[in-house]
Image (tube, grey):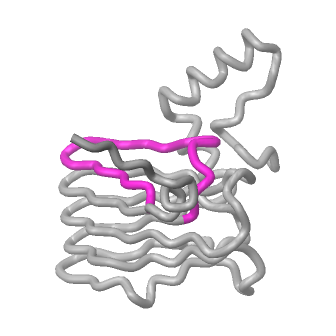
Amino acid sequence: MSTTRISPAAASAAPVRIAANATVTKRLGHWTTDRRFEVRAHRGQAVLDLRSPQIPDGDIRIDVDLDHAVLKLLVADDATLDDWDLRRTGRGRVKDTQRPQAQAGRRIVIVGRMHSGEIRVQRGGFAVLTAMCSRAYLADVRRAHQEGGMPTVADPAGTH
């Protein structure tokens, strides 16, 4: 039996995989430094916080496979969404009510398949409230209180 070593470059080339099958999966605060994600959800909900300044500059690519599921993206106020290559079947939509007028910030590219699902984009105060209504936020506040620092889950970039 041989062990295969993965080089750091190859490890970072693989997308981060997130599954939410009949469950709620949340990734909040400074949880990643990657820009490529695969989200698969069946009758579940996935929440991804993409506001962290630790994520390098450049496009973020999210490959989705949603079936009667919800993907909630917490993004910066100036981020733009590119869902041109997203295949939609059944009832479902991409809901981005606070879409910026000009393309000034980071671009988030969503590709893949969505069957009777929904992608909700939340910015600003809505993103902060979504992050605050989680167990991760409560744990982060406790940690910050013990260490004498500031919580990072509600607003990883520290803009609000």
Q: Nearer the viewer, residue 29 or 78?
A: 29
Residue shown at 50%/72% (left/top)? 61
Give x and y (percent) for residue 66.
Answer: 26, 66
Report which quarter residue 90 is drawn in.
Answer: bottom left
Residue shown at 45%/52% (left/top)? 6
Q: Nearer the viewer, residue 97 or 118?
A: 118
Q: Is residue 20 magenta?
A: yes
Q: Nearer the viewer, residue 3 or 138?
A: 3
* 149 lies left or right of 3: right
Q: Is residue 85 magenta?
A: no
Task: Report the residue that reaches farthest toward the front.
Answer: 1
Residues drawn in magenta: 15-35
Give x and y (percent) for residue 147.
Answer: 77, 13
The answer to whether residue 142 is above or below residue 127 is above
Residue shown at 63%/77% (left/top)? 107
Quadrant of the image for the N terminus? top left
Task: Report the residue that reaches farthest toward the bottom.
Answer: 84
Give x and y (percent) for residue 38.
Answer: 38, 63
The answer to whether residue 6 is above or below residue 57 is above
Residue shown at 34%/69% (left/top)? 64
* 31 lies left or right of 110: right
